[in-house]
Amino acid sequence: MAALDRVKVLVLGDSGVGKSSLVHLLCQNQVLGNPSWTVGCSVDVRIHDYKEGTPEEKTYYIELWDVGGSVGSASSVKSTRAVFYNSVNGIILVHDLTNKKSSQNLYRWSLEALNRDVAPSGVLVTNGDYDREQFADNQIPLLVIGTKLDQIPETKRNEVLTRTAFLAEDFNAEEINLDCTNPRYLAAGSSNAVKLSRFFDKVMQIQLHLSFLFYVINPVCILRANSMVGLLLSLATS
Ligand SMILES: Nc1nc2c(ncn2[C@@H]2O[C@H](COP(=O)(O)OP(=O)(O)O)[C@@H](O)[C@H]2O)c(=O)[nH]1
Ligand SMILES: [Mg+2]
């Protein structure tokens, strides 16, 4: 088997939305029996077959970084959390379908992760407002996952799912809504499993593209540097 490569995907969202349950389901294919409080960050790994069923098929490790905490934390906590935001290849935004606030907070979570180098004044979000432009040139693939679908009464499902569709559109992302306590929602061949696979393929594709650019651009830089050294040496010895 070809060497396994790895990519890093952040899993962000308010405490209690079901991030640990989701990550366990994605990585272990099992329901997490007794979720405990996530302190700092926990990482689990999912094996993903990139472009499955095609000649380009290759197996990769997807590291899922479940970052605990609250988006309204003090700036010192946020800056500590920023260490987890380095070299990110994709982001899964998790919200609880029974909790509107957790959906609204996804704007803040994504901006915290994407704009970590921007001055605080540029990080916006006042009174729940946000600027779609902030996501327009984002190159990092995003996926929005709504949990606790089982807790939404049939009579309210349409209303809730319409709201989440708008949310996903704001992020220019696909969405999956599920019950993390039921593995059937991610069963092989289901539409959710297809969306998930498409998202991880996108993450891999961008990573492969960036690696390709690195190897193409780097030799050019080395050649340029070598010719500059050669020129300086010939000037020095002439
Ligand atoms: N009914 C239901 N409970 C869920 C679902 N997802 C998570 N939970 C429960 O919500 C609670 C918080 O989940 P946890 O994974 O610890 O959330 P985290 O703080 O975001 O990591 C736990 O009691 C889970 O069992 C879901 O889709 N449906
Ligand atoms: Mg947790």
Image (tube, grey):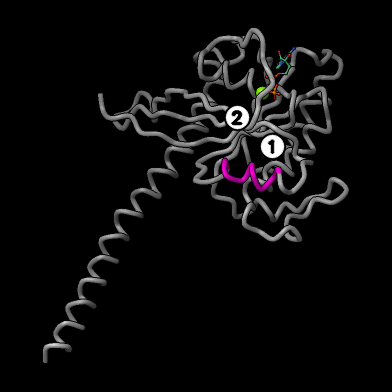
Give amino acid for label 2.
Asp
The residue lying toward the viewer, choosing from 7 and 78, is 78
Please tell me the numbered disc located at residue 168. Answer: 1
Q: Residue at x 53, y 35 (%)?
A: 9
State the SS at label 2: strand
- Expressed as whole percent of the image width and height from the top left, the position of residue 97 reads 78, 24
Mark 2 or mark 1: name the one nearer the start of the chain: 2
Relative placement, left or right, of 221 versus 162 is: left
Range of magenta residues: 77-84
The residue lying toward the viewer, choosing from 139 and 83, is 83
Residue at mark 1: C-beta within 8 A of ligand 1: no
Give amino acid for label 1.
Ala
Report if residue 197 lies within the magenta region: no
Quarter of the image for the N terminus: give it: top left
Tell me which image quadrant ligand 1 sits in.
Answer: top right
- Expressed as whole percent of the image width and height from the top left, the position of residue 61 reads 41, 28
